[in-house]
Image (cartoon, rainbow, N blue to C red):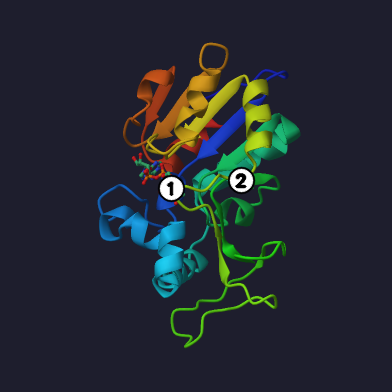
């Protein structure tokens, strides 16, 4: 069980493993998305220019899978911690599903975007809620300005969202907890290196991440089993 002092500021970074027990596939595990798709073909600006229909097929499939998923005990444990710590908890997710929100988390930074939002690839119109699937439509969606509507996702080569807030929260935190992330994708993989030495650094997941050396503690097991007993205030 993790004990917090009244001064602790906690930074939680979640990855695909946090939603695995909700039935959403991870990227790099057996059966993961990048074992079946080449990210250059479905999750890059070049793919969007070359084959937007293929990109929308990929994200339409992911919208279908995520819309059937429900939060698991890992998401609820994080929400409980947020209720207790309020703004002393900073929740940053690499996941594009909305399971933290569904579990009741109020302040989630989606650094890789949100699956159920779209935006125009040309004009400054804000990202908007969009749960539709576009793989069977003869025409792909267009903005009023004539631009193309794209998923509100950070693709490879693009800058993640909310980085200013994320760096501020990393500078402030005294406890850093990464959950269900393989520790290979930048910049998230380097967050722990920014805080180690001055913050307690904890990893939770069934196997050691690639950046294991930067963590002072590693608790091996599925997040849905470990977190409800671990994150108790
Ligand atoms: P990965 O697929 O790289 O890693 C998933 C991690 O979850 C692995 O380390 C597994 O051991 C772990 N895991 C599996 N089941 C788990 C469970 N029940 N509880 C806890 N952990 C579990 O996914 P990410 O690290 O999230 O980016 O990937 C990072 C980014 O790479 C994604 O956000 C995505 C991808 O390319 C973009 O699309 C921009």
Q: Is residue 176 visible?
A: yes
Q: Residue furthest bottom?
A: 138
| Foreground pick, 9 / 185 | 185
Tell me which label, 2 or 1, sits earlier in the chain: 1
Residue at mark 2: 161
Image position, residue 175 (x, y; %): 58, 22
Spatial CA span between label 2 and label 1: 17 Å
10 Å crowding of disc 2: few (<14), some (14-19), many (20+): some
**Whole-percent x, y for residue 196 in the image:** 51, 16
Q: Is 220 positioned to the left or the right of 19 in the image? A: left
The residue closer to the viewer here, 174 or 112, is 112
Tell me: residue 223, above or below residue 50: above
For numbered disc 2, what is the local secondary structure? loop
| In this view, the mark in front (2 or 1) | 2
Q: Is residue 3 at all visible to an observer of this figure? A: no
Q: Tell whether 9 sits left or right of 96.
A: right
Question: In this figure, which residue is indicated by the disc labeled 1?
Answer: 16
Left or right: residue 233 versus residue 223 is: right
Q: State which image quarter holds ligand 1.
A: top left
The quarter of the picture where residue 46 lies is: bottom left
**Above or below: residue 74 compared with residue 216:** below
Q: Ligand 1 closer than 8 Å to the CB at disc 1?
A: yes
- Callout 1: SS: loop
Disc ID at residue 3: none
Q: Are marks 2 and 1 in contact (CB under 8 Å)?
A: no
Q: Residues within 10 Å of mark 1 (few under 14, many from 20)?
A: many
Which residue occupies 40% across, 51% down?
20
Q: Residue at x 53, y 21 (%)?
A: 194
């Amino acid at each position: 069980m993790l004990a917090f002092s009244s001064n602790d500021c906690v930074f939680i970074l979640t990855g695909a493993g946090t939603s695995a027990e909700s039935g959403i596939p991870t990227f790099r595990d057996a059966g993961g998305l990048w074992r079946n798709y080449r990210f250059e073909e479905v999750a890059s600006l070049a793919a969007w220019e070359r084959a937007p229909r293929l990109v929308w097929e990929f994200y339409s499939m992911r919208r279908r899978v995520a819309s059937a998923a429900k939060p698991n005990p890992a998401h609820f444990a994080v929400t409980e911690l947020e209720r207790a710590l309020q703004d002393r908890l900073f929740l940053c997710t690499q996941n594009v599903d909305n399971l933290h929100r569904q579990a009741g988390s109020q302040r989630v930074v989606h650094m890789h975007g949100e699956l159920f939002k779209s935006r125009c690839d040309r004009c400054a119109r804000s990202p908007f809620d969009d749960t539709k699937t576009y793989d069977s439509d003869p025409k792909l969606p267009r903005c009023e300005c004539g631009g193309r509507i794209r998923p509100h996702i950070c693709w490879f080569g693009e800058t993640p969202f909310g980085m200013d807030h994320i760096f501020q929260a990393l500078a402030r935190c005294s406890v850093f907890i990464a959950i269900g992330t393989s520790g290979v994708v930048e910049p998230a993989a380097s967050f722990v290196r920014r805080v180690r030495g001055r913050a307690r650094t904890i990893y939770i997941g069934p196997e050691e991440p690639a950046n294991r050396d930067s963590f002072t503690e590693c608790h091996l097991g599925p997040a849905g089993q470990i977190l409800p007993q671990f994150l108790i205030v």
